[in-house]
Amino acid sequence: MPISKCLQKSEPLWKGWDRKAQKNGLRHQVYAVSGDCYVGEWKDNMKHASGLPCLQCRPIRVSSGKGTQIWKKKGAIYEGDWKFGKRDGYGTLSFPDQEMGKPRKVYSGWWKDDKKSGYGIQFFGPKEYYEGEWCGNQRSGWGRMYYSNGDIYEGQWLNNKPHGEGMLRQKNGNRYEGCWRRGMKNGSGRFFHLDHGQLFEGFWVDDVAKCGTMIDFGRDEAPEPTQFPIPKVGSTQQSPVATPERQNTAPPQPHPAWPGPAQPSPAQPGNRQVLFSVRASPWRLAAAHKADSTSKVGSTPKAGSPGLPCSSIQPLTASLQIKILDPDGVLEEALAMFKKTEED
């Protein structure tokens, strides 16, 4: 009885080629069309260095579980962890430096989804760098910033700006402790003027102190103290005040409107005096002026005369009398007009 055999179907050649083309594990230099170069581990055709030890990495001088990417256009170099084609984990980013002749480290820290996230150190210049927390390529969280002018800020950050509680210490020793908003002093805080030995505590709005109190603080140890200390609130001690010398030592004259006998004014040629009561009507004011022309100032008018409504000036009971100088006779004319208006 004849035996029949089924012929096995051969696998297409492209599948074998594709299987060989899949990059998995450690690979040597792999160049992209743009000229970028990557050396490190792969997984399913994606850069993937989990950070686990790999024995195959030793012969080619690549850190175990790491991958190195070199961008041709900018010359940037990244060496660190990868996850499914993105920088994820701990890594270092460097740029070429023409003066040094070797790559200069720019960032060293943690990454997530190809962005700086977590704790890291960013170098902005030879003497200016930031160390602290990152989120989405921005300084967010707690961090310390060293500026090139010698100032140091330590505190909370948000979107690459100081935001929250923080302290700014200047090069000369002065420092600010308080609230920050959008990179500026906003809210309550304290500014220590240690160079002058003073302390200001108050409220700020956009780097401008709006209100507060200033007191002495460490004035004895200050390198440039103020000339005079700030007096304390409620202190009975007073600073010396320059007072001008008195030239006129004559005793003060009593006010002419004060209750009591009227004081005659110095005799001056052409001066007219009008004596009237605040209760008197306009026509009585005119009569008082007429009677005053025949009697002395401050004397009591005769009984039955159309002068003042009261015979004498008595404190608290009599009407208040006022003496006015009328050199040009303006008041006399005004009284005459009032009298005429009343008669009409």
Image (cartoon, helix red, strand yellow):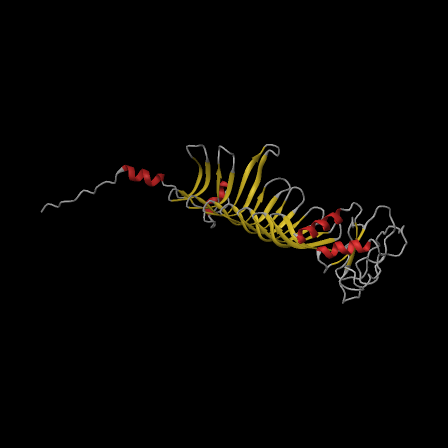
**Quadrant assignment, res 256:** bottom right
Q: Residue at x 66, y 46 (%)?
A: 151
- Taking 327 as reference, is 122 left or right? left
Residue ranking furthest to the left: 1
Task: Say whether residue 61 is visible.
Answer: no
Residue 130's x, y, as percent? 59, 46
Q: Residue at x 52, y 38 (%)?
A: 77
Residue 9's x, y, as percent? 21, 41
**Quadrant assignment, res 149:** top right
Residue 176's x, y, as percent? 66, 51
Residue 16's x, y, as percent? 30, 39
Front residue of 195 and 287: 287
Front residue of 184 and 142: 184
Q: Residue at x 62, y 32 (%)?
A: 99
- Taking 154 as reference, is 195 left or right? right
Task: Say whether residue 335 is visible.
Answer: yes
**Quadrant assignment, res 234:** bottom right
